[in-house]
Amino acid sequence: MERYGYVFAVLCIAASTAIFVPGRNHFAKGQWALLYLLIIGLVAGVSGVGPALLASVLAFFAWNFFFLPPHGTLSVHDPTDWLSLIVFLLVGIAMGLQTGRMRAREAQALARERETALLNRFSAHLVSDAPVHGMARYMLDEVTTVGGARCAALFMWDGSGERTIYRPSSPDCPETTEDVWTIAEWVRREAKAVGLPRATGAVMADAKGWPVSVSHAEAGALGKRQDIFLPLQSPSRMEGVLYVGARADGSPYTAHGAGLLVSIANQAAAFLERKHLQAAAVQADALREADRLKSTFISSISHELRTPLASVTATITGLLEGDVSWDAATARSELEAIREDLDRLNSSIGSLLDLSRLESAAWEPKPDSFELGEILGTVLARIPEDARDRLSFQLPEDLPTIRVDFDQWARLLQILIENALAYGESRPVKLAAVSAPKEIRMWVEDDGPGIPDEEKNRVFDKFYRGASAPKSPSGTGLGLAIALEIVRSHHGRIWVEDAEPHGARFVISLPKDMQPGAQHHEHA
């Protein structure tokens, strides 16, 4: 860009001379010098010190050649004109130097202001919870826009050595070829920068925040290059390598411009380290939660499995004792108790297997069209006879068929009905359904104490049983977790709400346009 300033200086002096010459007989010869000083000030303000000095010299000769007698020659007849020429040249040079330096300071101030704004924007972006690819895209866009780089890229490697490249949104970065990868690998391995300006290379190791820098040749690169490779080194690990291509105007990077790139690289390294620590913290939380669930699982299952086993063992032991005579009625009663305990044990084991199969996608739904009443008939057969009288049904005659997996949906309704019977305090339990334009909604409602608002989001958690219930029934605490997984596998939603005047209502929303096999991850 500097050469254009010199061209501008030549054109300004030439154009102004062409304009001034026709009027040289109308003004005194000294007045033309003042006009040339204005032109020199203009060149200095636009193009800087070097073009202003050139303009001063050209104006010196133009004034002498065209406006000092004899015209058309560089000779001077009047000795006082020599003094004017010398003073004019000195004043022009001084004006060019002063104005050019002021322009340079202004340009530096504007550049620092832009760089400060860039760092502030980048810092604000890093503080946010942006993903890595979002941070990379934003950083590379800023580097190419503000830094003037032809292209830029961020190289990263995962734990297995698999490499990933992030590019700016525009322009494309065709320079990220295999030789660029080779140098980036060297930077990653050696933790040294490549291509930083020589003016700062000698003090890189001592300057705070600056990485040690080597030349391209020392990194194994062939040919002359003007690009820069910066390691993103955090206190704990090498996060990646920032590649900044050569400047679009062909000029080399200055120490100040390279400093801006180093600051950006350091902030990016801090961001990536924070992301790494966050991921480690999430993993640690997941492990703690897994340990907690394992402890809860062992505590719950050991009680639910050992209690019926202990009861069965005690009953069988009593029946086998030879010193006690058992009549047929008493033996039958004891055997009925054994069957109930074994049913309870079988139910607990079945719940564990059902949830495991649902979560591992081993129990995929096989939907078909069924009448809801048909499924309820199967469910009622599984409900104890003494509890069936508490059930009531409100099913409209025009209720359409539902497309579900018969076994899974029967298991779902059985869980909700048994849950309502257990918590309903011997009061009626109602099952109802309605058809809406886009969904079929069904619900199971009890007349019990209800569920507090703070527990509504937890009742579908594994092993959770309502703490506010007056009498918590036995069970593994997996029933509603199984119900949630079944509804999700059918693209539906399930939630709990208050019933009027009191009680709990578990509502299922089943979309009419569901597509079997798709994933659905939201629930109310």
Image (cartoon, helix red, strand yellow):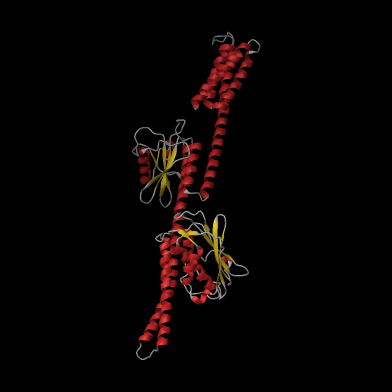
Q: Is residue 375 left or right of residue 189?
A: right
Front residue of 333/242: it is 333
Q: Position of residue 12 (x, y in %)?
A: 56, 20
Q: Position of residue 152 (x, y in %)?
A: 44, 39
Q: Position of residue 136 (x, y in %)?
A: 47, 44
Residue 45 figure quarter: top right
Inspect this view and state whether residue 239 appears: yes
Name the residue rendered at 62%, 13% in the picture.
29
Front residue of 439/130: it is 439
Residue 294 figure quarter: bottom left
State which quarter of the image contains the C terminus: bottom right
Q: Position of residue 88 (x, y in %)?
A: 58, 19
Name above or below for residue 280 compared with residue 450: above
The mark total stands at 0
Inspect this view and state whether residue 456 appears: no
Name above or below for residue 514 compared with residue 342: above
Front residue of 71/151: it is 151
- Can you name the residue that lies furthest to the front here? 397
Name above or below for residue 481 compared with residue 182: below
